[in-house]
Image (cartoon, rainbow, N blue to C red):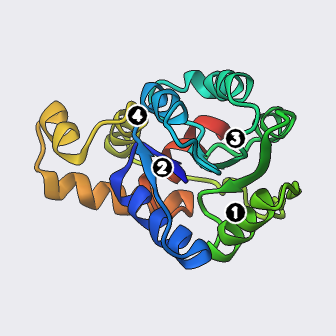
Amino acid sequence: MLIADDHALVRDGMRSLVCEVLGCVRILEAGDGDALMRAARATPPAQLALVDLNMPGMERGFRLAELAHSHPDLPLVVISALTSPDVVRRTLDIPSVHAFVPKSAPSEQICSAIEVALRGGKLPFAHRAPESRRPDVALTPRMEEVRQLLRQGMSNKLIARTLGISEGTVKNHMSEIFKALQVTNRTQAAQLDADSL
């Protein structure tokens, strides 16, 4: 099993889910596109890869097609915060991608995707109702600055240093941004911003 995500915490969570579904299996990890390509060449080969579409070195997902071309027998489950219809369609058009799971999905959906992919099936994308894609959001100029730096992948500490404010203040701004955008984490906040602003 190969788990590719640039966040160690996410990889830890995925590892727990995999063990829940498959029991004790050998797990390879990758934190960027280059490491993913190296891990895919490991011997014995992985039976399945869970891949974050938007980690560094994935070139906005184009590296996924390269992986599928060079390892056509490696079933792929894509887990991503990028869920625009075009991204989902392009990803599921890749023959060895068996499922596309949003990072906001419940763990049961990821477990189902793993099971379906290992059986050689293809899981249709579970579209969520487009309820409130983005409410009328009123952010202060400072919150806008914080959000722009968040989109650049900066940590709270780096945002604080860049803006000359305390890390605690950055955390407060983050809480307000999450509330305004109706999201629960940094990835969702950055992605919602990128998709809809």
Label located before the other in sequence (3 or 1): 3
Numbered disc 2: secondary structure = helix
* Front tag of 1 and 2: 1
Residue found 53% across the figure and 43% down from its top: 44
Return the residue at label 3. Answer: 74
| Quadrant where the image shows the C terminus | top right
Residue found 46% across the figure and 45% down from its top: 5
Q: Is residue 197 visible?
A: no
Which label sits on residue 148? 4
Numbered disc 3: secondary structure = loop
* Side of 85 relative to 107 (left or right): right
How far apart marks 3 and 1 lie (CA) works out to 13 Å
Label located before the other in sequence (2 or 3): 3
Label located before the other in sequence (1 or 4): 1
| Towards the viewer: 33 or 179 | 33
Disc 4 crowd rating (10 Å Cα; few below 14, some 14-19, many 20+) is some
Return the residue at label 2. Answer: 187
